[in-house]
Image (cartoon, helix red, strand yellow):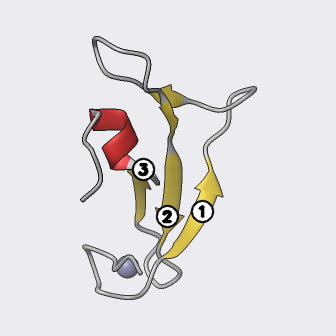
Amino acid sequence: MRKCIRCGAEMEENYKITSGYGIVIRPEKGRNAVKLKAAVCPQCGEASIYVDDPDKLIGRKKA
Ligand SMILES: [Zn+2]
C-alpha cells in the first residue's frame, strides 16, 4: 500500500504511463529496463511515479 506524501491517504496504484508502448527507465549501463507506473491520491490528486520491481532495475538480488 502506498500512502500519499502530501495528505497521508491511501493511493490508487497501477496507473499506466503511456506514450505509445509506455515509458521505461533503465540504468546507464545494462539492459534491465522496467516500465514506469503511477499512483494517484484520490483525496488531493498527488501523483507519484514508481516501478514495480526496483531489484530488477538496480540489478540487486532478492533476499
Ligand atoms: Zn493526498
- Locate residue 32, reporting x and y percent: 43, 26
* Ligand 1 closer than 8 Å to label 2 CB: no
Question: Mark 2, residues whose alpha carbon is within 10 Å: few (<14), some, or many (≥20)?
Answer: many
Under circle 2, the secondary element is: strand
Q: Residue at x 65, y 32 (%)?
A: 22
Q: Residue at x 49, y 35 (%)?
A: 34
Q: Residues within 10 Å of mark 3 (few under 14, many from 20)?
A: few
Which amino acid does the dot numbered 3 rest on? Asp
Q: Nearer the viewer, residue 32 or 17?
A: 32
- The CA distance from mark 1 to mark 2 is 6 Å
How would you rate the neighbour count of disc 1 (Cα within 10 Å): few for under 14, some for 14-19, many for 20 or more?
A: some
Query: Which numbered tag is attached to residue 53?
Result: 3
Query: In the image, what residue type sits under mark 1?
Result: Asn
Secondary structure beneath label 3: loop
What residue appears at the point 39 percent right and 24 percent down from the top-left corner? 26
Query: Does the residue at mark 2 contact the one at mark 3 (Cβ under 8 Å)?
Result: no
Q: Give me the disc on residue 33.
A: none
**Decide: marks 1, 2 in contact (CB < 8 A)?**
yes
Q: Earlier in the sequence, mark 2 or mark 3?
A: 2
What residue is disc 1 on? 14
First in sequence: mark 1 vs mark 2: 1
Name the image quarter holding the C terminus.
bottom left
Mark in the foreground, 2 or 3: 3
The answer to whether residue 18 is above or below residue 50 is: above
Give the x, y percent position of residue 41.
47, 75
Q: What residue does disc 2 label?
A: 39
Look at the numbered disc 1 and give the secondary structure of its residue.
Answer: strand
Q: Residue at x 29, y 84 (%)?
A: 7
Return the disc, 3 or 1, that comes first in the chain's sequence: 1
On screen, residue 25 above or below 30 = below
Distance from the alpha carbon under mark 3 to that under mark 1: 13 Å
Residue 11, horizontal then vertical, whole percent: 46, 78
